[in-house]
Image (spheres, rainbow, N blue to C red):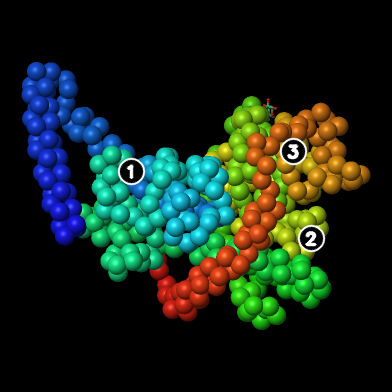
Amino acid sequence: MGSDTGLENSKRFLATWLIGGLVAGLSVMGLCAAWPELSPLSIIGRKKKRPIRVYMDGCFDMMHYGHCNALRQARALGDQLIVGVVSDAEIIANKGPPVTPLHERMIMVSAVKWVDEVIPDAPYAITEEFMRKLFDEYNIDYIIHGDDPCILPDGTDAYALAKKAGRYKQIKRTEGVSSTDIVGRMLLCVRERTSGDSPSHASLQRQFSHGHGQKKFDDAGSGSGTRVSHFLPTSRRIVQFSNEKAAGPDARIVYIDGAFDLFHAGHVEILRLARGLGDFLLVGIHTDQTVSVNRGAHRPIMNLHERSLSVLACRYVDEVIIGAPWEVSKDMITTFNISLVVHGTVAEDDDFEKDNRNPYNVPKSMDIFKVLESPLDITTSTIIKRIVSNHEAYQKRNDRKGESERRYYESKGYVSGD
Ligand SMILES: *[C@@H]1O[C@H](CO)[C@@H](O)[C@H](O)[C@H]1NC(C)=O
């Protein structure tokens, strides 16, 4: 019943729109008769240029480059991308507490360079009422969703209305990462540590967290640690995420480096500040080996390529060095014409200050080093701690989702598109 009246409404809407268009067309003709220099073609041409507005929604909890890639694909289907972010209350009601609260998720989504507008209170499952609001109030032309079916509790297709109205478009699922997978990596890393970090375990963990796991391995614990990353970094993906522009002449180039593991709102905020100090932000991303040496064998959670994509998707970033050295050398500063090297006050590797191998000795001696007050008190460890403190709930949720992921990979076939 509801969808019938919905169809009626959209027919009525279409009729109103057509009549409106006709009236507008007639008055344009009238105008043109009065002022012949106002050619109808130029007006029609301008009308055609109305940007196509596309909409996509999600929880964007523990946002990763898979989310970013979906947003990139959605944006390519229109001119402006409006993103609906599901509220904390809706996430709690539907699948338990989110790891990242709404204000952090808003920072993350807004910082993605393909996002034009953000709506902070999207429903968990899209409703007809909300869809109509999108069409009528937000002037959305198309609703975009991944190629996985989205079924409401009553068994119906959540996007039926948009499909009927011809205002639904689909994007291909991004392979290689899911929040389930990332939580799995974190939980595994916690178990590794509590079980005494035996060398063989540590090496398995390394292999695993770096996405090179070739076969499933039995976890001595609950049996849910059998996760294998499906991420296959391609040069094409890196190009898609890159900015085409190099630094312009006379540009003031700012450099910031770090692990940027589990890219979070704290990272985004320090990058925003750093970008504000110049015209071009160059981000050095440390190698997996460098991160392990400084933070332990169980880090990083995300490998170098994964971390690079997350940083590249951020609108404040102009360029990244995929595998930056620990020390900022004179040669690097010259090669990239770096004017300023910055470092945030909230960071995990603060020990280097006591060390005689301070990575910033050279920029300090050149007087081009600056410490930035980090706007948010969040580190990668904060995120891991949140998961661990809610260990059991996440473990259960993950096992459930892990099962459906496994089924997906078993029955998966080739899908074209990028
Ligand atoms: C190097 O950076 C400075 C700004 O710090 C700029 O004035 C200069 O033009 C840059 N050099 C080149 C060759 O772009």
Which mark identifies residue 345? 3
N-term mark: 1 or 3: 1
- SS at badge 1: strand
In the structure shown, which secondary structural element does the residue marked by tag 2 occupy? loop
Mark 3 CB in 8 Å range of ligand 1?
no
- Give the labeled residue for mark 1: 53
Specify the quarter for ligand 1. top right
Which residue is found at the position 47% from the left and 77% from the top? 407
Residue 162: x and y, percent? 26, 55
Whichever of callouts 2 and 1 sits on the residue coming sooner in the sequence is 1
Question: Which one is nearer the viewer's eye here, 149 or 96?
Answer: 96
Q: Give the spatial CA distance, label 1 vs label 3.
A: 39 Å
Above/below status of 120 relative to 398: above
Respond yes or no on whether mark 1 lies under 8 Å from ligand 1.
Answer: no
2 or 3: tag closer to the N-terminus: 2
> What residue is pinned by disc 2?
296
Name the spot of residue 144 as percent of width and height, x first: 35, 54
Rendered residue at 58%/47% (across/down): 312
Q: Nearer the viewer, mark 2 or mark 1?
A: 2
- For the residue pair 181 and 249, the one nearer the viewer reads as 181
Amino acid under disc 3: Thr
Please give left or right for residue 46 compared with residue 325 in the image.
left
Residue at image coords 31%, 61%: 158
Mark 2 vs ligand 1: CB under 8 Å?
no
**Residue type beneath disc 1:** Arg
